[in-house]
C-alpha cells in the first residue's frame, strides 16, 4: 500500500512549529501545481501574519475571501474571515464579510459586524472615512433598531 503525504498537513505542521519560511516555500510549491486550491491559499494569511508582514496578510485575506465569494463558498469564506478579523481589522475585510452574511440572510450578524468595526475604528482613531460609510449603511439599510441606535451613538464619537 502506497501512502501519500498531505501537503496541507505538512504546511500546517510547519506553521505550528513556527517554521514560516519553510512553510511558505512548501505552500508556494503546492500553489504552482494547484493555483485554485483555496484551502492552501487560506494558509498564506497565517504565514504572512506570523512572519510580521501584516499588510501582505491582509491583501491575501482579501484576495482569498473574494475568490471564495465568487466561487460560492459562502460559509467557508465567513468562517475564514471571522478568523482573520480576530487578528487584523481592515474595512475591506468587513465589507466582504457583510456581503457574505447578507447573502446568507444573517442580517443581524452582518450589521453587527459593521458596528463592531466602527467601534474599533473610533477606539483606534483609524479608518474614519470607512467608519462614516458603515454608519450610513446601518442608518439606511439596517432593519434592527438596536443596531441603528448603537450606530447613532457611535456616530457622536466620530470626528
Image (tube, rainbow, N blue to C red):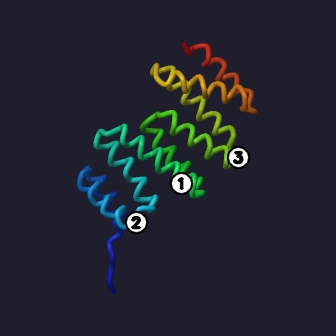
Which label belongs to residue 68? 1
| Residue 32 higher or lower than 157, as above or below | below
Q: Which mark is residue 105?
A: 3
Q: Locate residue 12: give its quadrant.
A: bottom left
First in sequence, mark 3 or 2: give its number: 2
Given this view, does label 1 or label 3 mark the residue nearer the observer?
Answer: 1
The label shown at residue 27 is none
Q: Position of residue 71 (x, y in %)?
A: 57, 58
Residue toward you, 26 or 145 = 26
- The image quadrant of residue 97 is top right
Quarter the N terminus occupies:
bottom left
Left or right of 94 on screen, residue 23 = left
Q: Position of residue 55 (x, y in %)?
A: 37, 37
Residue drawn at point x = 75 percent, y = 33 percent: 143
Q: What is the spatial separation of the Cα atoms under label 3 and label 2, in whole angstroms?
A: 32 Å
Quarter of the C terminus within the rendering: top right
- Judged from the image, the secondary structure of the residue bearing numbered disc 1 is helix
Q: Is residue 66 left or right of residue 29?
A: right
Identify whether 37 is placed above or below 104.
below
Secondary-structure class at tag 2: loop
For disc 1, the neighbor class at 10 Å (few under 14, some 14 to 19, many from 20) is some
| Number of the label disc, if any, that sits on residue 34 | 2
In this picture, is 121 found above or below 158?
A: below
| Closer-to-camera residue (121/9) | 121
Instruction: State the SS at label 3.
Output: loop
- Above or below for 108 versus 32: above
Amino acid at each position: 500500500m502506497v501512502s501519500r503525504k498531505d501537503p496541507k498537513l505538512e504546511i500546517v505542521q510547519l506553521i505550528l512549529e513556527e517554521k514560516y519560511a519553510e512553510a511558505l516555500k512548501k505552500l508556494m510549491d503546492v500553489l504552482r501545481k494547484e493555483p485554485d486550491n483555496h484551502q492552501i491559499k487560506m494558509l498564506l494569511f497565517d504565514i504572512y501574519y506570523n512572519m510580521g508582514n501584516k499588510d501582505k496578510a491582509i491583501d491575501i485575506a482579501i484576495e482569498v475571501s473574494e475568490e471564495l465569494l465568487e466561487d460560492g463558498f459562502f460559509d467557508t469564506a465567513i468562517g475564514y474571515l471571522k478568523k482573520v478579523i480576530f487578528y487584523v481589522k481592515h474595512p475591506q475585510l468587513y465589507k466582504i464579510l457583510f456581503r457574505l452574511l447578507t447573502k446568507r440572510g444573517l442580517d443581524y450578524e452582518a450589521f453587527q459586524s459593521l458596528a463592531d468595526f466602527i467601534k474599533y475604528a473610533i477606539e483606534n482613531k483609524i479608518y474614519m472615512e470607512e467608519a462614516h460609510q458603515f454608519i450610513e449603511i446601518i442608518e439606511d439599510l439596517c432593519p434592527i433598531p438596536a443596531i441603528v441606535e448603537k450606530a447613532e451613538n457611535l456616530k457622536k464619537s466620530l470626528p
